[in-house]
Amino acid sequence: MSVQQTLVLIKPDGIAKSLTGNILTELSDTGLILVGAKIVQVTRELAEEHYQHLSEEKFFDELIRYIMGEFHVKRVLALIYHGENAIAKVRDVVGATNPEQAHPSTIRGKFGRITTKGVFENVVHASESEKEAEREIKLWFRPGELIQTIYPVESRQVAKTEIFWKQEKK
Ligand code: ADP
């Protein structure tokens, strides 16, 4: 057993079906610590990078459209959980990839479905290994968005324009 971190995405079907609260409760019951969270509009670039290992699959195009929210709402909730054995603990409550094979006590078993077009609408994503978790967390989050430094960081000088809340004129 080791201390790990894992990326969870509440996918657009989970958001559209108002399952966020139920899913957060199940994840909280693992005892893991939430160290990052944000709502994201998934671009095609991010979707294709996230699912790069599936690019040869016949369901790839539908999968990209699904995670981008074309069938539901255009947002996902991205979460990072940290703690002992985080990857297996989260995957246990998430259940099997195919929602029809997922145990009925799991998130996917309770709330997932397969559409008539064959898309696995399985409500959540959860990293499958330490290597994948690191790749995914670095893809979805910047170091400053986490309340804990979980991978080594470096500073770089960059010149950029930042957006601020507009100040009211007095
Ligand atoms: P997991 O999300 O359980 O780690 P994979 O990485 O293999 O599983 O697949 C990523 C996502 O692609 C799945 O969560 C699911 O949405 C979709 N998917 C996987 N296999 C299939 C399939 N045979 N048919 C349709 N969609 C699939």
Image: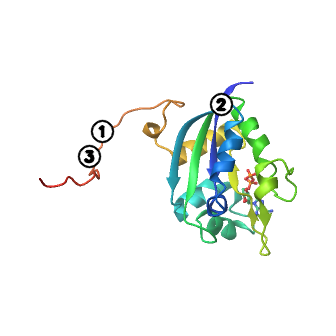
Q: What distance separates the C-alpha of mark 3 from that of mark 1? A: 7 Å
Give the mark count.
Answer: 3
Image disc number at residue 157: 1
Task: Name the element at disc 3.
Answer: loop
Choose mark 3 or mark 2, whichever is in front: 2
Which amino acid type is shown beneath numbered disc 3?
A: Ala
Among numbered discs 3 and 2, the one appearing first in the sequence: 2
Q: Residues within 10 Å of mark 2 (few under 14, many from 20)?
A: some
Asked whether 19 or 133 is in front, the reply is 19
Is residue 64 found left or right of 151 in the rendered image?
Answer: right
Marks 1 and 2 in Cβ contact (< 8 Å): no
Q: Residue at x 69, y 53 (%)?
A: 124
Quadrant field for ligand 1: bottom right
Q: What distance separates the C-alpha of mark 1 from that of mark 2? A: 30 Å
Image disc number at residue 159: 3
Is residue 53 found left or right of 145 in the rendered image?
Answer: right
Marks 3 and 2 in Cβ contact (< 8 Å): no
Q: Does 87 appear above or below 169?
A: above
Q: Residues within 10 Å of mark 3 (few under 14, many from 20)?
A: few
Q: Position of residue 33 (x, y in %)?
A: 61, 32
Q: Residue at x 82, y 54 (%)?
A: 109
Query: What residue did someone put label 2 on?
Result: 4
Question: Does mark 3's beta carbon lie closer than 8 Å to ligand 1?
Answer: no
Q: Position of residue 69 (x, y in %)?
A: 59, 66
Q: Residues within 10 Å of mark 1 (few under 14, many from 20)?
A: few
Q: Residue at x 69, y 66 (%)?
A: 60
